[in-house]
Amino acid sequence: MDTEEQKLFSASHRAMETGDILPLLKEELKYLIQSRRLSEGKDEMSVSFSVPPTVDELTPRDEERRNRRKEQNREAAKRFRAKKKRDYLNLSRLVFALEARNRTLREEVRCLAAERESLCHAFLMDVRGTISAPIGDG
């Protein structure tokens, strides 16, 4: 078995043991890419994930830009939070006003319903009085 097949076999064994197929997929993909490169007559590509990528140091100018962007971002975030707070307070005030208006309207509805009930009762009493009164009294 060559090293590629050994890596593929090892990855499939780990996948079956752990239930995580990601290492197997990575190895299969690397194997497929290498096979295609070789079939196209290209050189073999070596891929290693063990060495972390190096971070380039920034020039003073780039550092200054980075710090300026950070400060602008902080200020924008501060403005955004202040705006959200204002919006929340405005909405809270609106909710309070609408709830008060709702209470007033519900009370008005209750009063009007009571008045309607009273008028209906008076109307029925008047109609009953008219019906029960003798015809010649009028």
Image (cartoon, rainbow, N blue to C red):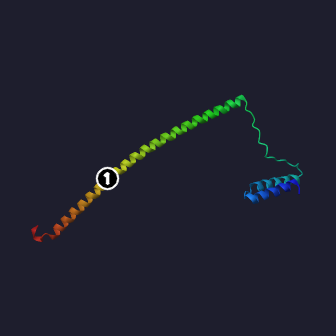
Q: Quadrant of the N terminus?
A: bottom right
**Which of 35/55 is in front?**
55
Left or right of residue 4, residue 119 in this image: left
- Where 113 falls versus 89 (above or below)? below
The amino acid marked with disc number 1 is Glu
Residue positioned 82% across, 58% down in the render: 9
- Where 54 falls versus 101 (above or below)? above
Quarter-of-image position of residue 17: bottom right
**Which of 117/123 is in front?**
117
Q: Position of residue 23 (x, y in %)?
A: 76, 54
Q: Quadrant of the C terminus?
A: bottom left
Left or right of residue 53, residue 36 in this image: right
**Which of 15/67 is in front?**
15
Q: Which residue is mark 1?
A: 107
Q: Position of residue 4 (x, y in %)?
A: 85, 54
**Which of 26/113 is in front?**
26
Q: Position of residue 8 (x, y in %)?
A: 82, 56
Q: Residue furthest top?
A: 60
Q: Rate crowding at label 1 as few (under 14), some (14 to 19) or many (20 or more) other CA atoms within 10 Å.
A: few
Residue positioned 57% across, 36% down in the render: 76
Q: Residue furthest left?
A: 137
- Where 73 falls versus 99 (above or below)? above
SS assignment at label 1: helix
Residue positioned 19% across, 66% down in the render: 127
Left or right of residue 69, residue 121 in this image: left
In this rendering, the count of numbered labels is: 1
Q: Residue furthest front?
A: 17
Q: Position of residue 46 (x, y in %)?
A: 84, 47
